[in-house]
Image: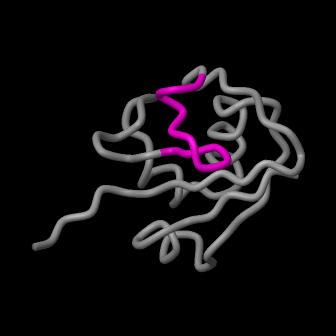
Amino acid sequence: MVKILLFANLRLAAKNKEIEVRAADVSEMIESIKRNHRRVYDEIMDNGKTRPFVKILVNGRHIEFLQGMKTQLSDDDDVAIFPPVAGG
């Protein structure tokens, strides 16, 4: 199982600070979130693409610097998803 840490409004959508899914890569993880945690999915995705400013990190590294949605996941990986944040 891959543990996904959620922050800000994603925690509210999931009613939890983390969720777990079975997935071989980030794309499969997103599909599992879509099936099992629709409100979280709607917060991070729009028309099949990651919403602007949403950050997905695998073991502390942004997927943009790995293999994007094809980044492989292992059972003990920690994934963190950060929604856009505003403030001053």
Tally of numbered discs: 0
The boundaries of the magenta stretch are 56-66
Q: Is residue 24 above or below residue 32?
A: above
Q: Which image quadrant: the C terminus?
A: bottom left
How are the colours assigned in the image?
A: one colour
At x 61%, y 76%, the residue is 17
Q: Position of residue 16 (x, y in %)?
A: 63, 78
In this view, which residue lies farthest toward the left?
Answer: 88
Position of residue 50 in the picture relative to residue 52 (left or right) = right
Q: Position of residue 54 (x, y in %)?
A: 38, 47
For the point 76% across and 58% down, the residue is: 3
Q: Position of residue 42 (x, y in %)?
A: 45, 51
Q: Is residue 55 above or below residue 20?
A: above
Q: Is residue 13 magenta?
A: no
Relative horizontal placement of residue 52, taking residue 80 as reference (left or right) = left
Q: Is residue 17 left or right of residue 48?
A: right
Q: Is residue 24 above or below residue 4?
A: above
Residue 10 vs residue 62, the one in the foreground = 62
Q: Residue 87 appears in which quarter of the rendering?
A: bottom left
Residue 18: x and y in percent read 67, 69
Q: Residue at x 70, y 40 (%)?
A: 29
Q: Is residue 57 magenta?
A: yes
- Residue at position x 66%, y 33% in the image: 26
Which of the 4 quarters of the picture holds residue 86?
Answer: bottom left
